[in-house]
Amino acid sequence: MGDPKKPRKKWQSPKHPWIKERLLREIELMGRYGLRNKKEIWKAETMARKVRHRARALLALPPAIREAEEKSLLHRLIQLGVLPENATLDDVLGLTAEHFLERRLQTIVYKKGLARTPYEARQLIVHGHIAIGGRRVRSPGYLVKKDEEDLVDYAPTSPYFKKRLEAAQQA
């Protein structure tokens, strides 16, 4: 069963970590998304790899069995916002780590303009200034679903929320 205080690893490190192109790409991704370390990139790569693997396994199944599982996989990825509405199983095979990094709360907060930089977005989240639907979320790696994206805002108890209210009243 395992020790509940030591959860299973959610990522797989690269087999060849010292390839120059990989190092440069990882550093560029860390800067663009404001990541703390490369493990966060590896988590996204592992998620993309697992989804692509499941899609390849579904393509190998007979069409009668494949339909229900294909529908559930596509629905989950569309709901997450990684794929567009009219996506097919071939689109799943094109998923990369960037698709999942775009759905992180840290990236959404930065893109919505709640923070000036991705690093500031991370700090606002960790310090408890960001909420989704009024519920505080303190994990920058939280994957925001498509229907939750509009609910991302400052927490009601945050001083940033109060500043925004005062600015709106003065305008």
Image (cartoon, rainbow, N blue to C red):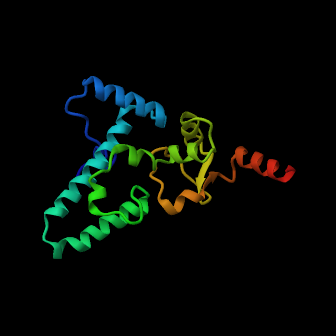
Q: Is residue 10 left or right of residue 139?
A: left
30 or 40, nearer to the observer: 30
The residue that appears at 54% across and 37% down in the rendered structure is 118
The answer to whether residue 69 shows anywhere in this view is: yes
Q: Is residue 153 left or right of residue 32?
A: right
The residue that appears at 49% across and 46% down in the rendered structure is 139
Image quadrant assignment for residue 159: top right
Q: Residue furthest bottom?
A: 64
Relative image position of residue 77 (x, y in whole percent): 37, 60
Relative image position of residue 114 (x, y in whole percent): 63, 44
Q: Is residue 40 above or below residue 65?
A: above
Q: Is residue 9 above or below residue 85?
A: above
Q: Where's the N terminus, which quadrant?
A: bottom left
Q: Is residue 1 above or below residue 111?
A: below
Image quadrant assignment for residue 84: bottom left
Relative image position of residue 82 (x, y in whole percent): 40, 55
The residue that appears at 32% across and 39% down in the rendered structure is 42
